[in-house]
Amino acid sequence: MAIRTIDVRERVMARNDELAAEVRRRLAGAGIPSFNLVSSPGAGKTALLERTLDALGHELEIAVVTGDVQTQNDAERLARRTTRLVQAVVTGGACHLDARQVMESLAAIDLERTQLLFIENVGNLVCPASWDLGETAKIVVMSVTEGEDKPLKYPKMFREAKYAVLNKVDLLPYVPFDVERALAMALEVNPHLRIFRTSALTGRGMSEWLDFLRAQARQAVEA
Amino acid sequence: MHEMSVALEVCRMAEERLGPGGSGRLRLVGLVVGDDAGLEPDNLSFCLDALLAQPPFGEARARLQRCGGDVLRLDFLEVDDGDPDH
């Protein structure tokens, strides 16, 4: 028996990061800002996208990639709000999307006809933080039915995100959620986080969110 | 939580490095895993050992070395080149 050691010393995420860089290059070349929506299950990512497609679908060409462990339910919900193809990725057990899945999804999207791309990740505040998808930014969605201390419990996700959405604010009169405490914790983890407060159900707070998206689409074209 | 995804990627890297027919000679996979890598080392070892016991591998095991930070690196592969006299 002759045992031989092969030095590798290679990052395990290297291949994913190469693909993510290629996704980023393609989207930048096409002038498309892309946002990776991450949250715990049930925070309202799909509802936020439904409301966004309703409001902006007539003025911006928006493509969507959805990720779920099982079912295409989210993709089917969103497909009812847009004439564009909604790409569903069923991960078959994996707890996150990866750059290869996004790259494969791009092949089905008419990039020349797209001004904004959303990637709705699998509901999970842990794993998606570790996988670069080639997005412009991660947007972490939390809701007022969760604990205020989510940012402290899942700091990596809040550090990786550039934006946060506090959703379901219409429920504030009915739940013991301290908004200022939650926002302070989010900013403690990531002082640069820009935070939106929305209700995807009633539309409250949506105008600032929509203006932000319009500006992102405009700036990406100008760049 | 995504230990199986990481384990699958490690196996892909090992297969790529060892080439066709080489995976069966693999005996040990050495990984460096940071405390902030977002992985549970015991779970990762479990997933790797399960995968490395299946074809195209067979008798390989994983050895994890802990360190600080968010490092996640495939450090080395140990292969059995067989009896040098045959």
Image (tube, rainbow, N blue to C red):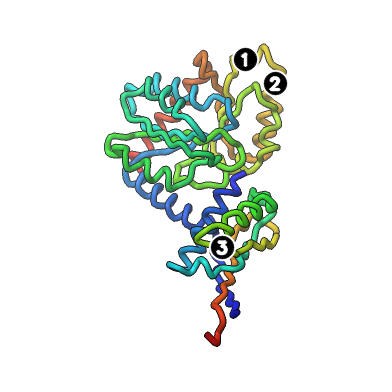
Residue at 44% x, 55% y: name it: A18
Q: Residue at x 40, y 23 (%)?
A: A53
Q: Could you say whether the residue bearing mark 3 is in a helix, strand or loop?
A: loop
Q: Secondary structure at mark 2?
A: loop
Q: Which residue type does callout 1 highlight? A: Leu
Secondary structure of residue under mark 1: helix
Please tell me which residue lies in front, B18 or A196: B18
* Residue underneath mark 2: A177
**Tag nearer the camera, 2 or 3:** 3
The image shows residue A191 at horizontal and vertical percentages of: 63, 39
Instruction: Give how far across and how far down residue A141 sits, in percent.
Output: 56, 30
Front position in the image: A179 or A63:
A63
Q: Quadrant of residue A154?
A: top right
A14 to A216, vertically: above or below: below
Q: In whole angstroms, how far apart are the C-alphas of marks 2 and 3? A: 53 Å
Point out the frontmost of discs 3 and 1: 3
Using the numbered discs, state the Cα–Cα distance from disc 1 to disc 2 in whole angstroms: 9 Å
Three-letter amino acid code at the position of disc 3: Gly
